[in-house]
Image: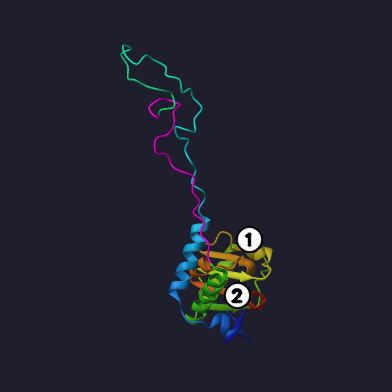
Amino acid sequence: MKVKVQTLDGKTGSDDVELNDEIFGLELRADILHRVVNWQLANRRGYARAARERSDVARTGKKFGRQKGGGTARHGNRRAPIFIGGGKAHGPRARSFEQSLNKKIRVLGLKTALSVKAREGKLIVVKDLELKDAKTKALREQLGKLGITSGLFIDGDTPANFRLACANLYKVDVLPVIGANVYDILNHDTLVLTTSAVEKLEARFNG
């Protein structure tokens, strides 16, 4: 698959880049994408904190009153949930939401996400992300020429000016090649790769 290399100004150059069909030309597998996205989101969740229950609090277990004649209920110890400082009744337990997923499925999911963007015509390849100044307004105008309102930029080594300029733009994010993932690719309307990113992605899958 050949794609024209563009610039951030929206101009199309004379250069083409050849995209590997084994990475950018796969069929849509909604089941694979679903599994990988669920795996990513589940592993983002933090651990559930446990409450201290009756057996976890440090209070006396000695019977503090008479069984009869005291005019109160027949309590056995101060760890009971009805007392201040007692244990929590039916409190939350410590829990991890982490899931495991086969590496082959994760790799196939990323390839499928890249292929979906290429098939939909929402994959743009640019020469680089170099900017003269780190100006958000200027970058917004350049992205308007490319027709990008929601875009994920992936580069081998993102220039500092571009990273600063896009920091305040809504739904415009930049990632290194090592951070490319299914959820972020699908969560943005347009995927923008630099020529360097294309090379490194192909090396990542072939390595």
Quadrant housing residue 102: bottom right
Q: Does residue 44 appear in the picture of this structure?
A: yes
Residue to which mark 1 is pinned: 164
* Whether residue 35 is situated above or below residue 198 in the rendered picture: above
Please tell me whether mark 1 or mark 2 is closer to you in this view.
2
Q: Quadrant of the N terminus?
A: bottom right
Question: In the shown orientation, is residue 182 left or right of residue 13?
Answer: left
Q: Quadrant of the C terminus?
A: bottom right
* Front position in the image: 133 or 90: 90
Residue to which mark 2 is pinned: 193
* Whether residue 62 is situated above or below residue 106 in the rendered picture: above
Residue 89: x %, y % from top left: 39, 35
In magenta segment, residue 95: yes
Q: CA distance from mark 1 to mark 2?
A: 18 Å
Q: Residue furthest top?
A: 69
Q: Amino acid at mark 1?
A: Leu
Quadrant housing residue 18: bottom right
The magenta-colored residue range is 81-101
Secondary element under disc 2, as helix, strand or loop, is strand
Q: Amino acid at mark 2?
A: Leu
Secondary element under disc 1, as helix, strand or loop, is helix
Q: Does residue 14 appear in the picture of this structure?
A: no
* Front position in the image: 24 or 40: 40
